[in-house]
Image (cartoon, helix red, strand yellow):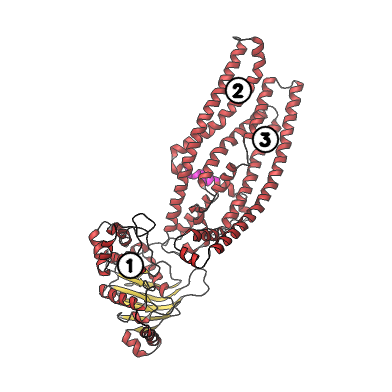
Amino acid sequence: MTPPNATDRRFETGRAVLAVARLLPQISRPRTALFIATTVLVAALPLAMTVATGLLIGAVPAAAEAGPGSPEARDAYLLLAAGVTALLLGRLVDNVHRANAVNLGRELELLLQDRLVAAVARPAGIAHLEDDGVLALLRIARQLGADFIRPERAVRGLAAIAPEFLAAAGASIVLCTFNLWIGLAWLVAWPAIFLAMQREYTRVGLTAYMRSTEMRESEYVRDLAMDARPAKEIRVWGLMGWLLDRYDRQWADRLDHSNRFQRMRVRTAVGVIGALGALTAATGLLLAQAGLSGAVGFAALSVYLVAMTGMFKFTAFDDVAAFLALGSLPVPKVLALESELAADERPVTTELPAEAPARSVRFEQVAFAYPGASRPVIEGLDLEIEAGTSLAVVGHNGAGKTSLVKLLAGLYEPTGGRITVDGTDLAGVDPAAWRTRLSALFQDFTRYQLTVRDNIALGAPHLAGDTDRIWKACEPMGIRALIDSLPNGLDTVLSSEYEGGTDLSGGQWQRIALARALFAVQAGAKILILDEPAAALDVRAEAELYEQFLDITAGLTTIVISHRFSTVRRADRIVVLDGGRVVEDGSHDELMALGARYAEAFTLQANRLARTPHA
């Protein structure tokens, strides 16, 4: 996503405010109707009080001269009653108006966040989560730090400014009855001044949006200083001073950038105040001349003067005006992102047979390059994986092993070639339906700060209530005794940050994650992918784990990714990747007999293992 150009910026505020207004009925039509009605009343009642007050001022001399009980006195009392009634009703309606606006604003933020999360979750793959424009919007949506770009504040700003705008317009119309050109000048001046200031606020907001990458970095540095996970390294290496210094420098740079825009805003404000001063002086001079010459009566003059003072209740310079511009700015961007990601959805044109894969999964001349990368990681890959067999994919770092399984899982789409399951091209298959046939455990598997039950059942959330099935997934991993020893068994939260929670060792987490993968298999997954999930273990522990797992998953289509050649020798078939292509293919014995890359790497790693002293 690209920032708007200079031409677009002139209309950015108007589009953003209109986007906010169009979303309000989606929250609640009755409350939006109430918002509109109270907006009109909050503007009209003060104007009525203004007219009543002006007329009252003009009626007081005649009422005083005529005495109590006179028609003139009764007229003055009626004007007083009308003014007080308008004042009291105005206060009451204003309270309802503001409370309704606050509630609508909060629900607008929830609506936008729900739609943003739904939009980001909609694409089948994950490439969009590496796009800087998407990440910038997500940072705004999460409201990290002291972020002032909040749609809730935009609704509050709209609730405050819209009545003022209408009231100023009404006062201008009143002044038109005195002098058409003066009234029209005020009618044009306030909107022009307001829009000029809104453009300045929008410019500041767009700068914050365009610098979102830098802001994310400063927030990341701040969070490092407060997060428990990196706390050990930060203290052992004495990094706290470095982190705080970097955070201070980044924020100083941001403030310097903001101050430059602040100076621009001050120049605009000085010009605006000068124009307002000239218009006010001209209006006051004309009213004074009209009053002194007797061209305008005392009552009418009072109405005009009160109307003119009421003009200055409409302001373009305070925080409320800034909230309207800045708070509404991300709304059209979120809606545009929603449309953009919806447009990226690929059509579903075919369905897989119920038993697929029954024969094989094939990579046919598959090519793939990560978004923005200059070189492909996979190029011309041909590979057939027979159903019901175990396949080990080995190779050095960067050979394309993980990219292969990401393509198979539909997290990215091939840039060339195709992937088929029993002859059906996965490009036309619903990714969500295909993934019900898969169970995957990646090297960087997630350690959910949830209960043991949830950590396992997330492999098939629709079966989370089946405790027997959960225990069945635990038993092959030998973790039932571990779970029974925890304070609340399956309901123990796996995080020491929660009361009654506990954390696990790396190996224990490993087995919980593997149980999650097995739980998905129990739910019907036919392909199990293990992408170096045990890379953090030593060679012997990893080999033992794979030996055990191959026994457990015998007869299942299993794909094991590893850069350790010595741990996968029992797989039915082993392929060696290099440069995104299969360079060797066969069983362990066949590849050893070949005496090429696999044999050399296996022998080298085996010799290193033999020289490793036992603990």
Number of residue marks: 3
Please tell me whether residue 371 is drawn above or below residue 72 in the rendered image: below
Please tell me whether residue 32 is drawn above or below residue 465 in the rendered image: above
Residue 431 part of the magenta segment: no
Left or right relative to 293: residue 331: left
Region rendered in magenta:
17-24
Q: Amino acid at mark 1?
A: Gln
User: Magenta stretch: dominant SS?
Assistant: helix
| Earlier residue among tags 3 and 1 | 3
Label annotation for residue 52: 2
Q: Amino acid at mark 3?
A: Trp
Label annotation for residue 508: 1
Please tell me whether residue 563 is drawn above or below residue 464 in the rendered image: below
Classify mark 1: residues with Cα within 10 Å, few (<14), some (14-19) or many (20+).
some
Residue 450 percent location from the top left of the image: 35, 58
Residue 134 in view here: no
Q: Amino acid at mark 2?
A: Ala
Residue 576 percent location from the top left of the image: 39, 81
Work out whether residue 434 or residue 516 is closer to the camera in this orientation and state it: 516
